[in-house]
Image (tube, rainbow, N blue to C red):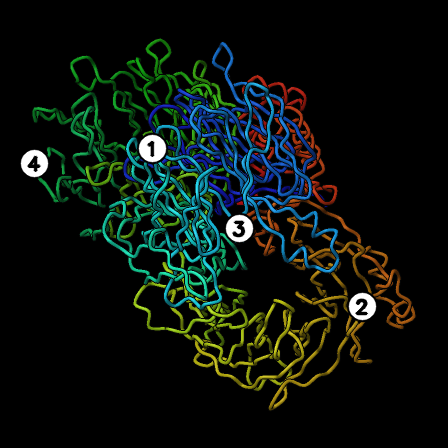
Amino acid sequence: MYLYNLTLQQATGIVSAINGNFSGGKIQEIVVARGKILSLLRPDDLGKLQTLHSVEIFGCIRSLAQFRLTGAQKDYIVVGSDSGRIVILEYNKEKNVFDKVHQETFGKSGCRRIVPGQYLAIDPKGRAVMIGACEKQKLVYVLNRDTAARLTISSPLEAHKSHTIVYSICGVDCGFDNPIFAAIELDYSEADQDSTGVAAGEAQKHLTFYELDLGLNHVSRKWSEQVDNGANMLVTVPGGGDGPSGVLVCAENFVIYKNQGHPDVRAVIPRRADLPEERGVLIVSAATHKQKSMFFFLLQTEYGDIFKVTLEHGNEGVSELKIKYFDTIPVTSSMCVLKTGFLFAASEFGNHALYQFQAIGDDPDVESSSSTLMETEEGFQPVFFQPRGLKNLVRIDQAESLMPIMDMKIANLFEEETPQIFSLCGRGPRSSLRILRPGLAISEMAVSQLPGVPSAVWTVKKNVNDAFDAYIVVSFANATLVLSIGETVEEVSDSGFLDTTPSLAVSLIGDDSLMQVHPNGIRHIREDGRINEWRTPGKRTIVKVGSNGLQVVIALSGGELIYFEVDMTGQLMEVEKHEMSGDVACLDIAPVPEGRQRSRFLAVGSYDNTIRILSLDPDDCMQVLSVQSVSSPPESLLFLEVKASVGGEDGADHPANLFLNAGLQNGVLFRTVVDMVTGQLSDSRSRFLGLRAPKLFSVKVRGRPAMLCLSSRPWLGYIHQGHFLLTPLSYETLEFAASFSSDQCAEGVVAVAGDALRVFTIERLGETFNETAIPLRYTPRRKECFEAAGMGENGNGNMNQMENGGDDEDKEDPLSDEQYGYPKAESNKWVSCIRVLDPRTASTTCLLELQDNEAAFSVCTVNFHDKEYGTLLAVGTAKGLQFWPKRSLTAGFIHIYRFLEDGRSLELLHKTQVEGVPLALCQFQGRLLAGIGSVLRLYDLGKRRLLRKCENKLFPNTIISIQTYRDRIYVGDIQESFHFCKYRRDENQLYIFADDVVPRWLTASYHIDFDTMAGADKFGNVYFVRLPQDVSDEIEEDPTGGKIKWEQGRLNGAPNKVEEIVQFHVGDVVTSLQKASLIPGGGECVLYGTVMGSLGALLPFTSRDDVDFFSHLEMHMRQEHPPLCGRDHMAYRSAYFPVKDVIDGDLCEQFPTLPLDLQRKIADELDRTPGEILKKLEEARNKII
């Protein structure tokens, strides 16, 4: 079995973020690392975050830093990754790519303790960079520029110290003296030698300054001093002429200013009044804002509170350190203060946000200062504050983030064309259930009812140079309605349009006159109000029309074409007639190329399943240039011109192209390239869009022409970052559409459906999914979808899920918990609830809070043998669970609930006490299987409790997943992979007949077929195991049930071993797997969701040719286009186990971003053209989504 791995939605969580001017000039940008993806974001003028560029680096980004050489205008990006190399990137805005400026190797690959890459520190003047490991090694590289102003990098200088753990490093701003780097270090050499543990208890953290002597080219330890053992983070203080230099040490409960030869200045961090005494306060992220005359720091604590830190300094150094409460926002992994007055907050979990500063916290607020520090017997006197609503910040945009996906189910509960993905995301009070649908999000601006059922709609400007449309024209079966666009939209009658007849087309013709085509003729309305009418000859009527602003072609009934052109005076002149062999099904004229007077191509679709390209040149007018036969009569044609582009916003270089798109009656969209000189058609692709023939309309998206296809659902075809994307819109079926532009809505679409006129805009291009979020209260754990009983066909699917959180005492908090989090409690206190949700209305129909410190961990629906209650819900809970210092619990329970009111609410039947935490529950042959610790047990339903029927205690550690199929049971162990079991009813015994030889720490599992399981482990690998066919047959056919074999195990395990048939390193912990098909009538693939919030798919190949093609393409891409941050692609995908039978589609899809000559080189090696390779890539993606 060969699989094709493709990321459908890139990771949305952010590990670290930096800001600077990466494209040069004054524009502020943000670079974010999302695990293995590097993205460049820029807030636009309205404060919306736009992604300019995103690239997968096939490695793990551990740290990011930005630096600029003295006097330069542009920032470089330094990346510390798991490649054992330091990489310096520069953003190239012409080509919209990251260019690798330098790559220096210093160690082994992988995230190791002593290989640098975990920490980065930059000399504030941009002269040197330090890259550090968690332990022992630190390297300093000197950066400079050569005569051509290119960046140069020195060989590494060592600043190693063995037996030392590093907690944080930063550059010290000392002006243009020798660069200095500061580090928080802990020496454990004595603790290693001392077996009594006394030395370990006395180990002390130090703050150490390292000086790089530029003259001697050498790094030395300059100064070291003891620092609080709670110190966890360093922040550079501006120096030179701007400030006092030195560092801020953030420690537990304190912020301390330290510098060589300067006394410590210490202030206590204010704490929330409701925080238990034993909990400390740690700073988790920091941002500095520096202006000419002043600077301040924003420090955020682990509870989400931001404090503004200011220093009072003079010639003698720092006299006072003040910490003032600023605002509370969700906990971030990094914060960036932009010079344009924005604060970008990359949240640890949940959505990221962009805030605007309303004020910089100069108003009086809770403040602690070094001058008011009071020492008592118990220690320093704390300062208390109460969190409040945002005062200094206001949120202006947010970026959706699915991190972390805790569980995911794919089901079609809404009975739409494609299934929906229901994912449980987030943590604590910010968690949510998100319903993802493939497609772009729509924001609806207006809906208005019309007096009848319209058949078509157009928008027209009054003049070519107008910014906005003037009229919306709506055609009905026997009339035409004209609406003028102004402050409001209202009907007008003085526009010159004929309103007693339906219209076939309305458009601007020439520079400033309007044209209306109706069945009996063409009405040409000049700017000064004169009206010219052209009438059809005899009894014939106009059936189809195509126009492009300077040329018009009409088709009369019977198949006659008449061609008109606009002459120099603006009159519409008849040029040529042409008889076609039969009725015309559809026509379109290509757009006029820039600087020309006319377009050369006319496309005509006929009912004999052909499309013809005719010439409109005066020399060979109406001659057939080429013919294309298609699978079904064409219904609609559209020429789409893609302008030539060299890099720029959309990435790849591509020459100007003309595409002919045809919507066929069988629901297929057919796309082909038209040669701009000869008119020949080549490189055709087709894609099934829906059950109705697609109608094609030209719209504008981000100022570029795009195509709207209206089939049983709307689709948008547009160019995004060099790729042509055809994506569905999450909207209802539309009949007819036109692009719409007014001062309220610059780029919209006006469409008709039923008897309503709708105006909408298309949000966030380039996304695969759009989401609807339903907020939850606590961290979600598991969920189960079920159809409500007794509701017949239109049963509303309900969903059940459980959520857990730390304890929460005061429920009447006036502030939103989503913003502030819950009050913190002791470590062994839990709150938990079971929620029944109706996803159609997004309403919770039942919410059961679990009492006395119980927390829910597993859930399943079960039908027992005696059908007395119908479907029941089983929930596994633990009471008083504690993980530290030793894992312990008071008791475990399995609750059995029955459904009331058609599944809307729950009633507890009984609960059964068990000896461990039931982490896995599953229905099996009318009974309930439970995995409790290392015991697999089968229960039946009794009157007062569950009754034990059978058990097997031979599992190695802890059972965390159970799946069943026929009489086989597939059990996943927390650290020993899968066990295949069989239940023999006659002997009432559970046997383990096969297991895996590799220890795997399972995080997700899914049953693929009778002999195959898919699993994922906590190191980011996905793998499939299969029982060999002969073993499987033997077990099924053996009349003794293989008892003899079962009693003699192998390798302390089962008698048979499963084989690993697929192995792949995703690079992100996979938390859920499911087999599903995301397209109507498409093949099934395995979808996975990860902790970082990405969604991916593994598609099985059906032909050997495809496997050969893609594996060769992958091989060439590995050689010609190595990953950006220096990790070897093959080694990355085989990080723990050699990659087996999986082709990396993410690498193959980087093919269009290569330079054209490299594309041709690879294509020649594969005996293909670049176009054919792009077509194959597109087909592979279209099979999945």
Tell me the CA gap for discs 3 and 1.
Answer: 28 Å
| Foreground: disc 4 or disc 2 | 2
Tell me the CA gap for discs 1 and 4.
Answer: 33 Å
Q: Is residue 751 above or below residue 559?
A: below
| Foreground: disc 4 or disc 3 | 3
Dot 1 or dot 4, earlier in sequence: 4
Category of crowding for the residue at label 3, using alpha-carbon neighbours closer than 10 angstroms: few (below 14), some (14–19), many (at least 20): many
Dot 4 or dot 3, earlier in sequence: 4
Category of crowding for the residue at label 1, using alpha-carbon neighbours closer than 10 angstroms: few (below 14), some (14–19), many (at least 20): few
Q: Percent x, y for residue 314?
A: 32, 36
| Disc marking residue 1078 | 3
From the viewer's side, name the closer residue of 188 and 149: 188
From the viewer's side, name the closer residue of 800 and 353: 353
| Foreground: disc 3 or disc 1 | 1
From the viewer's side, name the closer residue of 461 and 106: 106
Helix, strand or loop status at disc 2: strand
Helix, strand or loop status at disc 4: loop
| Foreground: disc 3 or disc 2 | 2
**Amino acid under label 3?**
Leu
| Foreground: disc 1 or disc 4 | 1
Q: Residue at x 59, y 51 (%)?
A: 204
Tell me the CA gap for discs 4 and 3.
Answer: 50 Å
Q: Can residue 564 be seen from the camera position used here?
A: yes
| Disc marking residue 273 | none
* Residue on which disc 2 sits: 992
Dot 4 or dot 2, earlier in sequence: 4
Q: Residue at x 15, y 41 (%)?
A: 483
* Residue on which disc 1 sits: 702
* Residue on which disc 4 sits: 494
Helix, strand or loop status at disc 3: loop
